[in-house]
Amino acid sequence: MRHGEFRHPRLVPVYDAECPWSRDDEWFLAVVSETPGVRVLDLGCGTGRLALALADAGHTVTGVDPAHASLDAARAKPGAERVTWIEGTSAVLADGSFDVAVLTSHVAQFLVADDEWARTLADLARALVPGGRLVFDSRDPEDRRWERWNPVDSRRRITLPDGGVVQAWTRVHAVAGGRVDFTHHYLFGDGEELLSSATLRFRTEKELRGSLRSAGFAVERVLGGWGGEPVGRGDGEFLVLARRE
């Protein structure tokens, strides 16, 4: 299944167990909270980990995601009533309705085609107020993260809340033109194996800056790590902070 960890009812809890609150969430929360009580869009909110924390911090939060199963999981979590959950893409966003928009967990890389990325940025510019902030992460292709996505280096054990254990590993199939095709394998204790395939786009810093400029954003800064390191000296990330002009 394409994007199975977000869409398959049995894999969504696995994703939640594998991706708990971490330093990237702390970074996004801190950046948004530089201004108290803002209207925040979490585009590609998934199961709501960050959206719920933003609401708990006093922000007015809307979580948008195309994956029904992920939103079901988000709506079932404590405090979910404080977030507005919308199933869809950036196309559903109302004009001028947000002060800040975030795309976390490398959601930007799932927008593979250049026209899809451009449409999304245009929608975000439309949905943000003038001067509104856009904050997102994308992996630096110079870090070549996909080279660690192999059945040996990527093998892991994921413990579920009920005590069950899932064996997981990743296999890359193709790398070309900034696109990486791969499949996550999940083997459950009862012997069922589920697959989740995807393609990610690894854009260069120059490509990201150019696409943002074309969409009407001014880039404030690009960091390379969750501790504020410069590009090339952090965690192999592009942490992008921009404003709608």
Image (tube, helix red, strand yellow):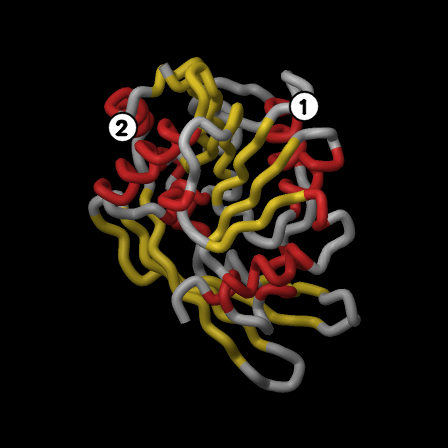
User: Measuring 44% from the left and 22% from the top, which residue is drawn there?
Assistant: 231
- In the picture, measured across the screen, residue 188 lies left or right of residue 239, that is right
Query: Looking at the rendered structure, which numbered label has been put on residue 211?
Result: 2
Q: State the SS at label 2.
A: helix
Closer-to-camera residue (80/187): 80
Q: Which residue does the numbered mark 1 point to in the structure image?
A: 37
Residue at point 52%, 32% (across, down): 235
Q: Is 219 on the left or on the right of 241, as rendered?
A: left
Q: Looking at the picture, tell me which residue is in the foreground, 151 or 33.
A: 33
Residue at (64%, 61%) from the top-left corner? 73
- Residue 128 can be seen, yes or no: yes
Rendered residue at 73%/74% (across/down): 164
Task: Give x and y (percent) for residue 5.
Answer: 52, 63
- Residues packed near mark 1 inside 10 Å, few (<14), some (14 to 19) or many (20 plus): some
- Where residue 65 appears, x then y in whole percent? 49, 51
Mark 1 residue type: Gly
Proximity of marks 1 and 2: CB atoms separated by less than 8 Å? no
The quarter holding residue 96 reads top left
